[in-house]
Amino acid sequence: MAPQVLGVLSRRFGDFATAEDAVQEALLAAATQWPTEGLPANPRGWLIQVGYRRMIELVRGEQARRRREDLVVRRDPDDKRYAPAPDEELTAERDDTLVLLFLCCHPALAPTSAVALTLRAVGGLSTAEIARAFLVPEATMAQRISRAKQRIRTSGLPFRMPEPAERADRLIAVRQVLYLVFTEGHTSTAGPDLRRVDLAAEAIRLTRALHMLLPNDSESAGLLALMLLTEARGPARTGPSGELISLADQDRSRWDATAIAEGVALVTRALPRGPVGPYQVQAAIAALHDEASSTEQTDWPQILALYEVLERMAGSPVVALNRAVATAMVHGPAAGLAALDALAHDPQLAGHHRLAAARAHLHEMAGDQAQAIAGYRVAAARTSSRPEQLYLTMRAARLAAQSVELP
């Protein structure tokens, strides 16, 4: 029966090889459906019908593939059309993910749309995760990504690494995407785990490839340094059950000394070379944290000074929040709380758990346990990260227990 079906399809379409594939698909469908649905009245006709439909799909798919190949052939010059050898290693120039990163960050797209699309295509983040990273509603982000996809689809952009003259226009968005992917990997905005190690590792891998591609770009070097110095603390950030451990309570002997040394070396070389950008400043702050033997021994005045530089250079609500905490470490919790008060009406931070957590921490430093407990509980209710919820809830419970024990 199968040869007869093959003959019918081969005659109808004139493509023996594809007809064979279609017949195999029809036979597989028969083996799956006939035992449960019963033998059809005309088994051969049933196979021909199923094979015919599958043949149409295969032919259409092949035609579409040929059209795409013809389009690629017309786009790229002859010297760029070649297939890599099986044993050829990937380099920064041949990393398809890096190519995709630059493609999504094309100047034809608005910067926010480019970043959002790349986080989706390259970082694998969900629309909800990207929306949280930008502090905007999920529906707004979904529309932004959809429009960006349509713009890429209709632009006719070739899938290749841009020429050196084009890269400079896209670098700001490329770095921002890599930083946001890393941030989501370092501290996941939702879910049961504090970290997404694979996501952070991929961001570091791509940033290392970018640094290899542009070794004289000081800000790309600063970004790689920032990632290494931040992720170096990863092993000490969680306890045996995955619970979050604050920076002050971490066992610093568990920090990755090799990553710290590489990060410090990178930022040390990048800063004098200039121009100095936000990622280099953040890397310098991270280096001060990593080189300190304890929270008390940290050079907080220098960190505060760097945050003030960073705020002038690339101010944002998150930078202002971190500066307020550094202010508290240098000038006391009252000064830090006053700095936080200035952020209370910021539309991006007003309902964010970070602001509530920072305020609770500074109230705890000031000895105001009632305000600290309330703040930690508010922060726990606002975050969608399970480890952060547990940490903040336990912090509030610990302070409440201490309050009960006081005479």
Image (spheres, rainbow, N blue to C red):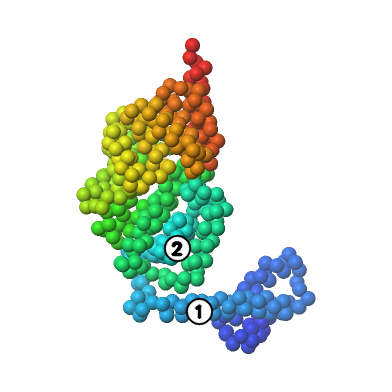
- Across and down, in percent, residue 58 comes to 58, 77
**Residue type of the residue flagged with mark 1:** Arg
Label 2: how many Cα within 10 Å (few below 14, some 14–19, many 20+):
some
Give the image quarter of residue 110.
bottom left
Q: Which mark is residue 67?
A: 1
Q: Is residue 39 above or below residue 45?
A: above
The tag on residue 253 is none
Q: Nearer the viewer, residue 383 or 391?
A: 383
Decide which of 111, 92 is in the foreground and name it: 111
Residue drawn at x 49%, y 76% is 68
Foreground mark, 1 or 2, reads 2
**Image coords of residue 346 (percent x, y):** 47, 40
Q: Is residue 25 above or below residue 202?
A: below
Extreme-top residue of the structure:
407
- The residue under the point 30% across, 33% down is 300
Residue at image point 41% right, 30% down: 338
Tell me which residue sits at (33%, 44%) in the image: 312
* Percent coordinates x, y for residue 203 in the rendering: 39, 53
Helix, strand or loop for disc 2? loop
Q: Position of residue 6 (x, y in %)?
A: 63, 82
Quadrant for the N terminus, please: bottom right
Image-based side of 210 in relation to 109, left or right: left
Q: Quadrant of residue 218 in the image?
A: bottom left
**Disc 2 target residue:** 109
Q: Is residue 251 visible?
A: no
Q: Residues within 10 Å of mark 1 (few under 14, many from 20)?
A: few
Q: Which amino acid does the dot numbered 2 rest on?
A: Leu
Gap in Å between the C-alphas at discs 1 and 2? 26 Å
Disc 1, disc 2: CB below 8 Å?
Answer: no
Exactly how many numbered labels are in the figure? 2
- Asked if residue 401 lies left or right of residue 8, the reply is left
Local SS, label 1: helix
